[in-house]
Image (cartoon, rainbow, N blue to C red):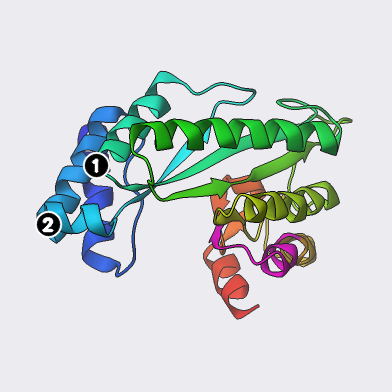
Amino acid sequence: PVPTRHLDMVYTHARYSDKAFMGSVTDPANAADSVAMAEIVFGKESIRETPALLSLINVSSPRRYDDRMLGCVKVYAKARQALLITPFLMAGAMSPASLAGTMALQNAEALAGIALAQMITPGLPVIYGSFMTNLDLQSGATVFGSPESQLTLMTLAQLAASYKLPFRSGGTFTSAKLPDAQAGYESVQVMLPAVQAQTNFILHAAGWLESGLVAGYEKFVIDCEV
């Protein structure tokens, strides 16, 4: 059920994971519930010293954080829980078609969220996130696994390193609907530069299909093997 969905999610994370896990960001109240559950499991003082939650804050590009995300930033930052600040840019739609323009916007959006988190709680653990793709300007469809996203990933990883911040990117992205040859080469074209860029946190590392609309069990197994 929707009212308890976030509780079920956090319960499952806490029970079956031995790593820091993502809290809910669907609403500030749900974020507060996530923190409360983590405090019950790990102890209030313990999670303030060693964060148990790493929650994903998405920017409503271009250049906007909505009330829900800002509220969640405040909740998690005040509880000293780590944040993953990630602009989601589609070049040619939500950002300039040029790579230089898209990377400039991505950097500004990420740093704005990181700065806010640091203003609330100085020294808060944060990850500089990047999630960039582009449009097929002929069809208007979102394209994953493109050369543009690879170049952007490599450049932004260097920017994050210059700020001395850990870097997040994807992943085995593909626009393919099946775990076929297209899925294979598109996924490798994104995962390889992510590894070469020494990405600290790779999200969507396995199972991605059809531009993120589908999680494929077969694809998950193949990605893990590769």
Locate the N terminus and report the quarter of the image it occupies: top left
Residue 203 magenta-highlighted = yes
Helix, strand or loop at label 1? It is loop
Question: Which quadrant would residue 72 be assigned to in this image?
Answer: top left
Q: Label 1, label 2: how many angstroms apart (C-alpha)?
A: 12 Å
Label disc, if present, on residue 79 of the rendered structure: 1
Q: Is residue 39 left or right of residue 157?
A: left
Answer above or below: position of 37 versus 27: below
In the rendered structure, which amino acid carries the disc numbered 2? Answer: Gly
Question: Is the residue marked by circle 1 packed among few (<14), some (14-19), or many (20+) residues within 10 Å?
Answer: many
Q: Residue at x 46, y 38 (%)?
A: 57
206 in the magenta segment: no
Q: Which residue is the site of mark 2? A: 43
Q: Which residues are magenta?
A: 190-204
Q: Amino acid at mark 1?
A: Ala
Horizontal and vertical percent for residue 202?
A: 56, 60
Question: At 73% across and 42% down in the image, what residue appears?
Answer: 133
Image position of 87 (left or right of 65): right
- Tell me residue 152's x, y (percent): 77, 48
